[in-house]
Image (cartoon, rainbow, N blue to C red):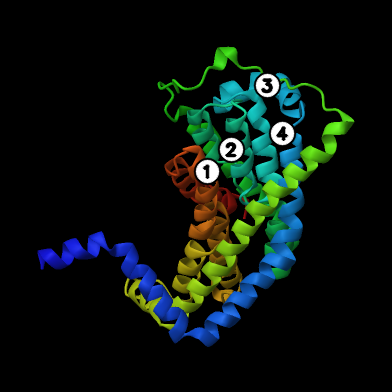
């Protein structure tokens, strides 16, 4: 038995990936449809909305915008969030553009040595949010058929993000990144010349294409994973287990789906029967705040190469989900 346990631990991911390939073959028909749906979602919704923001953030990071913003907001950002004023660009763009733009901006700030690794970890906890277009348009109007619900969810989402940011001002407060030389740093860049525009635009587009393709891959893969879990009956098994604790099956399915992949989970919670109407709004609020494992891995793929820990992101999003439910309950 000990030998089996040690072998499973040693080859855990190998076993998982082999099972994944087997499931791809066994449920190929459903998986193909799921992959097509995921690809269509990326091509029609994600790509048009996020790609311009990625390019814009790359371009902004080549200008003195962050320097000007830092000078204006440093007296507010430092006492409230314990980060430099230049970090405000990550909060603003992460809030208005949706997942995972905030992570991309934080990495850009760290690369330019505007923030330290510890400050990046503080920022990563609350600068990745669902965009207003998604919350108001897709969730509020399209799924719930009620713009007021979308407004309530958006206000709760933003307020909870700010509260998480305040909580994370204490993250590693007594520690200092020895590789970061704050006293020698100057975020002011030389003014751009017209001759530089073509090179900078080309570089920004290349970097943005790489990121948006990565996100598309995650969306397709997690659409297939959800299809496998549903077709194999694993989702129903989890739902039946939670039903034993008094949680109705349809609610269990929506929670599990949302924790794995945000869009599918929100779609299920919004379509719960009228009996659970208020509960469906609260569950949707939590899922929007938490973001799901799919988004977590998207963010991790962006920040890992910069040596930024994923732990503050996970704790922050869990807190944001809880705070968001509280704010939504009060507003309702």
Q: Classify mark 4: residues with Cα within 10 Å, few (<14), some (14-19) or many (20+).
A: some
* Residue hosting label 1: 303
Name the residue beneath numbered marker 2. 107
Q: Nearer the viewer, residue 282 or 238?
A: 238
Q: Residue at x 74, y 56 (%)?
A: 49
In the rendered structure, which disc, 4 or 3, sits on the residue that comes first in sequence? 4
Q: Contact, CB < 8 Å: mark 1 with mark 2?
A: yes
Q: Which of 230 and 267 is in front in this view?
A: 230
**If you read the primary sequence from the N terminus, does the residue marked by circle 4 or circle 1 appear first?**
4
- Mark 2 and mark 4 lie on one chain; the one further toward the N terminus is 4
Find the distance from the CA under tag 3 to the CA under tag 1: 21 Å
Q: Which mark is residue 187?
A: 3
User: Going from the N terminus, do you reach mark 3 or mark 1 first?
Assistant: 3
10 Å neighbourhood of mark 3: few (<14), some, or many (≥20)?
some
Q: Quadrant of the N terminus?
A: bottom left
- Quadrant housing residue 277: bottom right
Q: Is mark 3 on a helix, strand or loop?
A: loop
Q: In the figure, is residue 246 to the left or right of 218?
A: left
Q: Is residue 318 above or below residue 77?
A: below
Where 16 sits versus 30, above or below? above
Residue wearing tag 4: 61
For residue 245, side relative to residue 80 (left or right): left
Q: Quadrant of residue 238?
A: bottom left
Relative height, residue 242 to residue 206 (above, below): below
Q: Nearer the N terminus, badge 2 or badge 3?
A: 2
Measuring from the top left, give residue 312's x and y in whole percent: 45, 40
Numbered disc 2: secondary structure: helix
Query: Residue at position x 56%, y 28% from top?
Result: 81
Please report contact status of discs 2 and 3: CB closer than 8 Å, yes or no: no
């Amino acid at each position: 038995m000990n030998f089996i346990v040690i072998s499973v631990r040693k080859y855990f991911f190998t076993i998982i990936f082999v099972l994944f390939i087997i499931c791809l073959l066994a449920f190929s028909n459903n998986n193909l449809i799921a992959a097509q749906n995921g690809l269509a979602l990326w091509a029609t919704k994600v790509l048009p909305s996020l790609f311009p923001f990625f390019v814009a953030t790359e371009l902004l990071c080549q200008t003195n915008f962050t320097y000007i913003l830092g000078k204006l907001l440093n007296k507010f950002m430092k006492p409230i969030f314990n980060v430099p004023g230049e970090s405000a660009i990550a909060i603003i763009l992460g809030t208005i553009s949706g997942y995972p733009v905030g992570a991309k901006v934080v990495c850009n700030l760290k690369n330019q040595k505007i923030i330290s690794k510890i400050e990046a970890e503080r920022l990563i906890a609350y600068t990745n949010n669902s965009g207003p277009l998604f919350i108001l348009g897709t969730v509020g109007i399209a799924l719930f058929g009620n713009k007021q619900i979308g407004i309530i969810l958006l206000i709760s989402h933003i307020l909870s993000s700010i509260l998480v940011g305040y909580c994370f001002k204490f993250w590693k407060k007594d520690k200092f990144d020895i590789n970061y030389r704050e006293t020698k740093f100057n975020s002011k860049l030389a003014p751009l010349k017209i001759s530089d525009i073509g090179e900078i635009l080309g570089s920004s587009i290349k970097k943005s294409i790489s990121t948006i393709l990565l996100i598309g891959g995650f969306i397709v893969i997690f659409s297939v994973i959800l299809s496998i879990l549903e077709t194999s009956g694993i989702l129903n098994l989890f739902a039946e287990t939670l039903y034993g604790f008094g949680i109705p099956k349809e609610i269990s399915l929506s929670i599990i789906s949302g924790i794995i992949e945000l869009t599918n989970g929100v779609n299920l919670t919004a379509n719960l029967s009228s009996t659970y109407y208020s509960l469906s709004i609260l569950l949707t609020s939590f899922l929007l705040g938490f973001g799901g494992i799919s988004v977590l891995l998207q963010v991790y793929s962006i920040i890992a190469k910069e040596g930024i820990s994923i732990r503050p992101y996970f704790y922050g999003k869990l807190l944001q989900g809880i705070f968001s439910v509280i704010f939504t309950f009060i507003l309702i």
